[in-house]
Image (cartoon, rainbow, N blue to C red):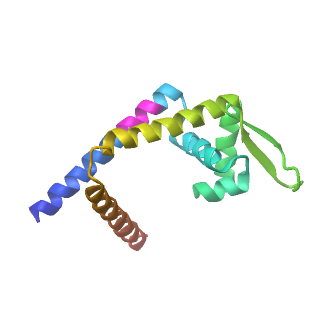
């Protein structure tokens, strides 16, 4: 049992470190985690409707409206009428938003390299599989408590 709790303690420590890094990024970028996540999705998908962003983020359309409002105000995205669906609004990164998206992608890759480049491929594969199993188990446990 001690090995199990010691392992959980390490996972919790890692979560704390990740949280601290996210908090640092929020302070430096003046963007919330939710707004950053929306920009990340736009970087992966390109211009998107608010409905598709809500689906990708797993939040309500009303929530996305608030996030987009904030990003429009800060100059990171713009809204325009959808070219083929008059009921939809297309959200597009501005030049300022593109800079943030590029920084996110670059930072993500750099952190991955710094954390894992010295880990042998076979150990990294086992670690990734263990994380997949742990995430799936934790997700199931959370669903059972709802």
User: Residue 63 appears at what percent x and percent y?
Assistant: 64, 50
Which residue, as the protein is rendered here, is positioned at the far left?
2
- Vertical comparison of 121 with 39: above or below: below
Identify the image quadrant of the C terminus: bottom left
Residue 41 within the magenta-colored segment of the rendering: no
User: Residue 134 appears at what percent x and percent y?
Assistant: 32, 64
Which residue, as the protein is rendered here, is positioned at the far top?
28
- Work out whether residue 73 or residue 97 is closer to the camera in this orientation and state it: 97
Corner quadrant of residue 114: top left
In the image: residue 126, left or right of residue 52: left
Q: How many numbered marks does the figure carry?
A: 0
In the image: residue 106, left or right of residue 53: left
- Vertical comparison of 104 with 89: above or below: above
Identify the image quadrant of the N terminus: bottom left
Q: Residue at x 30, y 55 (%)?
A: 121
Q: Residue at x 71, y 33 (%)?
A: 94
| Residue range highlighted in magenta | 20-25
User: Residue 23 appears at what percent x and percent y?
Assistant: 42, 34
User: Residue 10 appears at what percent x and percent y?
Assistant: 22, 50
Q: Residue at x 10, y 61 (%)?
A: 2
- Work out whether residue 82 or residue 139 is closer to the camera in this orientation and state it: 82
- Vertical comparison of 38 with 25: above or below: below
Chief secondary structure of the magenta portion: helix
Which residue, as the protein is rendered here, is positioned at the far bottom?
144
Corner quadrant of residue 52: bottom right
Residue 23 within the magenta-colored segment of the rendering: yes
In the image: residue 19, left or right of residue 6: right
């Amino acid at each position: 049992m001690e090995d199990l709790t010691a392992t959980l303690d390490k996972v919790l420590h890692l979560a704390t470190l990740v949280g601290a890094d996210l908090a640092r990024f929020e302070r430096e970028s003046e963007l919330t985690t939710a707004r950053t996540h929306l920009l990340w999705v736009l970087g992966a998908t390109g211009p998107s409707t608010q409905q598709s962003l809500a689906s990708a983020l797993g939040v309500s359309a009303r929530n996305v409206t608030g996030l987009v409002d904030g990003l429009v105000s800060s100059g990171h995205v713009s809204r325009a009428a959808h070219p083929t669906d008059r009921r939809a609004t297309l959200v597009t990164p501005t030049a300022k938003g593109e800079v943030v998206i590029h920084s996110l992608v670059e930072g993500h890759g750099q952190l991955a390299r710094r954390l894992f480049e010295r880990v042998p491929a076979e150990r990294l594969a086992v670690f990734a599989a263990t994380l997949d199993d742990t995430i799936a188990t934790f997700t199931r446990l959370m669903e059972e408590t709802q």
